[in-house]
Amino acid sequence: MPHYLLDACAVLAFINGEFGREMVLDLLDKAKAGTARLSMSIVQLLEVYYDRVYVVGADAAQIRVESLLAEPITIIEAISYSVMYEAGRFKTIYSMSLADSIAAATAKSINAALVTKDSEMQVPEKAGEFSVLWLK
């Protein structure tokens, strides 16, 4: 069964009705049908939360996060040492943001395709570091 790790930008595209929303909806439908697995790091969930706080305030942001938790998305709540080391390597080699390096390292560690539209992921993907499902 295919496994996908949602980047914050993918979830925000879904929430905001932006480019890529239909792909995320399709992945959610597949997860509900049991034909795909969806995961998300707590760090990317934090990115979604603080984005929503800026836009709609803390109370509404918390409600939005809680609604995401009702979806068939496994939240990875901890960062292992192996993910920490790999994220540090990605951050150093590819000059990624810390959150993006954690998303990439987490995707690699669970053998999941990273669902994103973040251009920071192009170079490491081309280097074969991890796989990406690009939002279209």
Image (cartoon, helix red, strand yellow):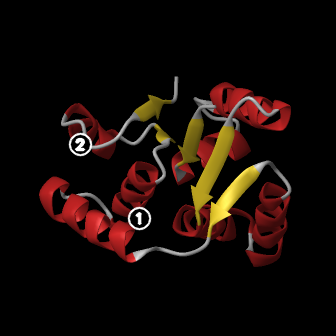
Q: Position of residue 120 (x, y in %)?
A: 29, 46
In the image, which is nearer the foreground, mark 2 or mark 1?
A: 2
Rendered residue at 59%/30% (across/down): 20
Name the side, left or right, on which 105 lies relative to 55.
left
Q: Is residue 60 above or below residue 3?
A: below
Q: Position of residue 61 (x, y in %)?
A: 75, 68
Give neighbour class at mark 2: few <14, some 14-19, many 20+ (Cα, 10 Å). Answer: some
Residue type, label 2 = Pro
Rendered residue at 47%/74% (across/down): 79
Residue 132 image label: none
Name the side, left or right, on which 57 lies relative to 7.
right
* SS class, disc 2: helix
- Separation (CA) of disc 2 from disc 1: 15 Å
Residue 124 image label: 2
Residue 123 or residue 12, whichever sits in front: 123
Give neighbour class at mark 1: few <14, some 14-19, many 20+ (Cα, 10 Å). Answer: some
Q: Which residue is mark 1?
A: 99
Lower position in the chain sequence, tag 2 or tag 1: 1
Q: Position of residue 136 (x, y in %)?
A: 52, 22
Residue type, label 1 = Ala
- Farthest residue to the front: give it: 1
Q: Which corner quadrant holds the N terminus?
A: top right
Q: Is residue 92 above or below residue 25?
A: below
What is the quadrant of residue 51 in the picture?
bottom right
* SS class, disc 1: helix
- Farthest residue to the left: give it: 93
Name the side, left or right, on which 43 lies relative to 57.
left
